[in-house]
Every structure is written in structure tokens, then in C-alpha cells.
Image (cartoon, helix red, strand yellow):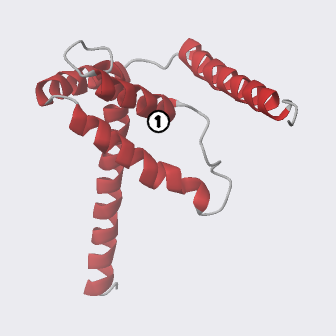
């Protein structure tokens, strides 16, 4: 028969797990809400720019630090992304964010779009090509 301490630790760990799942679901909803807020005319331009950058990174299948790198690979998902979302949300007016969160909840109930995934991957590839081209031009300049 399990001891009282063991039962309380099992309950505590399942409570922690469920709260982590809720936090992750809210993080995904807020990422979509930030994308929606970036298209709202009531949001200042600097909040829009940060919201687009954070939402694009959050919804992108490509990470800044690949997840297969031990420990460090998940740091961007666990630290950078929530901080970016928090900062972007703090710049968006409260009434706009409330509306966008409600709309994002409805959007997340729909099936996923392969066209959206292809567009995001194409944008990442285009960005990498542009960066490589800029680096190539920089290092090909003659030394005076």
C-alpha cells in the first residue's frame, strides 16, 4: 500500500503537469493572438513589429537553436519565446489583446494549413539566402 507522502507527490506532480499543459496551450494561443494583433490598426507600429517577429518565430518549424542540441536546444523555447511573447503582449492595448485571444481560440480549433507551413518555410529559406548573399558580398569586397 503506497504511503501518504507518495500519494501526495503523485498528486502534486500530476497537478504540475496539468498546469504546464495549460501554460503551453495559452502560450500557443497568445502566439496566434499576437499575429492577429499585429494586423489590428489600434496597435502601435513597434508593437506590431515585435508581435510579427515573435509570432513568426513561435509558429515557425525552424528554431534559432536546434532542439537536438542537449539542454541548450530547448532554452529558446523555454526562455526566449515566453519573454518575447510577454513583452509583445505588454505593448498591445488590453482591449485589443482580449479580442485577439478570443479569435485565436477559435482559430486554433480549425484544422492546420499546409499552405501556411510552406509559406513559413519559404520565408525562412528566403531569409537564409538573403543572409548568405549579404555575407558573400561583404567578404568578396577587395581589401584596400
Considering depth in this image, is 105 or 30 the residue closer to the camera?
Answer: 30
Between 97 and 8, the one nearer to me in the picture: 97
Q: Evaluate whether residue 116 shows in this view.
A: yes
Is 98 placed above or below 64 here?
above
The quarter of the picture where residue 55 lies is top left
Q: Up-down: is 138 above or below 42?
A: below
- Image x and y of residue 71, in percent: 59, 63
Write the residue at 26% across / 36% down: 89
Q: Quadrant of residue 78?
A: bottom left
Q: Residues within 10 Å of mark 1 (few under 14, many from 20)?
A: many
Q: Which image quadrant for residue 111?
A: top left
Q: Can you say whether 111 is above or below 68 in the image? A: above
> As drawn, is 111 to the left or to the right of 63?
left
Check the image and report above or below for 136 versus 15. Answer: above
Residue 26 in view = no
Identify which residue is drawn at 30% across, 23% down.
104
Q: Give the farthest residue toward the front.
A: 144
Of the 4 image quadrants, the one containing the N terminus is bottom left
Numbered-mark total: 1
Quadrant housing the C terminus: top right
Closer to the camera, 104 or 134? Answer: 134
- Residue at x 55%, y 55% (from the top left corner): 74
Residue found at x 59% / y 60%: 72
Give the residue pinned by disc 1: 58
Q: Secondary structure at mark 1?
A: helix
Query: Residue 6, position in %: x, y?
Result: 33, 82
Q: Position of residue 44 (x, y in %)?
A: 24, 22
Give the farthest residue toward the left.
95
Amino acid at each position: 500500500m503506497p504511503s501518504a507522502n507518495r500519494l501526495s507527490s503523485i498528486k502534486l506532480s500530476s497537478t504540475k503537469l496539468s498546469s504546464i499543459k495549460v501554460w503551453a496551450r495559452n502560450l500557443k494561443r497568445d502566439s496566434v493572438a499576437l499575429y492577429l494583433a499585429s494586423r489590428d490598426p489600434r496597435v502601435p507600429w513597434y508593437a506590431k513589429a515585435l508581435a510579427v517577429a515573435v509570432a513568426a518565430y513561435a509558429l515557425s518549424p525552424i528554431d534559432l537553436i536546434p532542439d537536438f542540441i542537449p539542454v541548450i536546444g530547448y532554452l529558446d523555447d523555454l526562455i526566449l519565446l515566453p519573454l518575447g511573447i510577454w513583452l509583445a503582449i505588454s505593448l498591445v492595448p488590453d482591449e485589443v489583446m482580449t479580442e485577439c485571444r478570443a479569435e485565436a481560440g477559435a482559430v486554433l480549433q480549425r484544422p492546420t494549413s499546409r499552405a501556411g507551413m510552406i509559406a513559413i518555410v519559404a520565408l525562412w529559406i528566403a531569409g537564409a539566402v538573403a543572409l548568405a548573399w549579404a555575407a558573400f558580398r561583404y567578404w568578396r569586397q577587395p581589401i584596400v
